[in-house]
Amino acid sequence: MSTSKLETYGTAVGNALNVTLLVASLVYAAVVIYFTQPDRGGLLDEQWNEDGFCIHNKHVDHWSSFDTCLYVDVIFSSILAVMWWKWRSVPGMDAISTPTVMIILSTLGHGFAHGGMAAKLRKGRDEQENIEDTPEEATWPMLLAFCGLFWFPLLKAAMPKMNSILVALFALMSTFGPVLGGGLKKQLGFAYIQTIVSIALHISQLSLPTEEKKAREYMTMAMTGVIPMITAWIEALFCGAFFQSLGGHVWYDAAIILSYIIFYVNSYQANMTKNRTSSTKDKTT
């Protein structure tokens, strides 16, 4: 297959994946909003609906799904950080350097947020209370920290070409919007975050110039969203059936960072092959 056909194929696949994942995220949000209304149960799993997450080992100190999310996020973001440090200067890797740094930071922030949620579980609060911080409990320093350590790097990773000031404004809106609006019930917290990130990422990707969509990373970056999206649906629909016993929400966090690590390794290998080929051609001319 010629290079032009490969580029056309990659662009088409990337477009299709970005559109599909965006629609899947919006449908997920709509389903959660609809079926968490009073007297509209039946589709979403009861265990998931109780907390808005599928929590394994809920009453086991330091080994709930939230604890293991913290461990997974810290360990694998550290591994990705080492990869980035070693490969950041490889020709061709510069295009994904900024998103990778932001993914590392946002994954750490994500993990620390789960660590805070795990700490709340350990306090033995009533199971009917929201696991997420309520607007009354969340202090301004906590919200600002969440904005800076989670929302900003996450949105910057999704929209790396956007001016950082604008990204910061979007991060502030994402953080304080629910608070000013009276707060979100616990079942909507995850859908809220996933929907905003999906809109930012996939519209940003779909808006790239045609030439940039020809890069193989356009297609492979879109692929990183497939397993997390499938995992999100499984968690909400089949928590009690089998997902909780397998570890619960930790698999969602693992799917995100591992998918990106696979993408990053694949990009490194492709660029190394390209660089070796280019070097060989230069020597023979």
Image (spheres, helix red, strand yellow):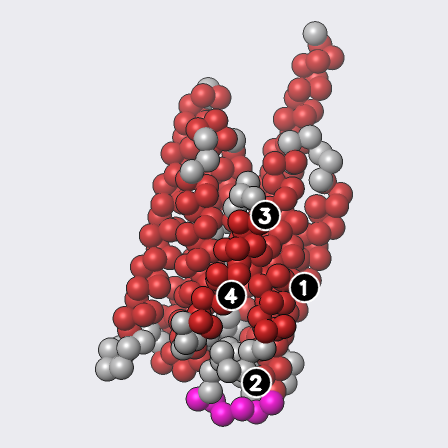
Amino acid type assigned to the residue bearing label 2 in the image: Leu
Q: Secondary structure at mark 1?
A: helix
Quadrant, the N terminus: top left
State which tag comes first along the sequence, 3 or 4: 3
Question: Where is 152 relative to 204, above or below?
Answer: below
Amino acid type assigned to the residue bearing label 1 in the image: Val
The local crowd at label 4, few if under 14, some if 14 to 19, many if 20 or more residues have their Cα within 10 Å, is: many
Amino acid type assigned to the residue bearing label 4 in the image: Thr
Q: Secondary structure at mark 4?
A: helix
Q: Identify residue for label 2.
A: 121
Q: Identify residue for label 1.
A: 74
Question: Where is 33 relative to 91, above or below?
Answer: below
How far apart, in angstroms, are the residues tagged by discs 1 and 4?
A: 22 Å
How far apart, in angstroms, are the residues tagged by discs 2 and 1?
A: 20 Å
Q: Identify residue for label 3.
A: 164
State which tag comes first along the sequence, 3 or 1: 1
State which tag comes first along the sequence, 2 or 3: 2
State which tag comes first along the sequence, 4 or 2: 2
Can you tell which mark lies on residue 168? none
The local crowd at label 3, few if under 14, some if 14 to 19, many if 20 or more residues have their Cα within 10 Å, is: some
Q: Secondary structure at mark 2?
A: helix
How far apart, in angstroms, are the residues tagged by discs 3 and 1?
A: 25 Å
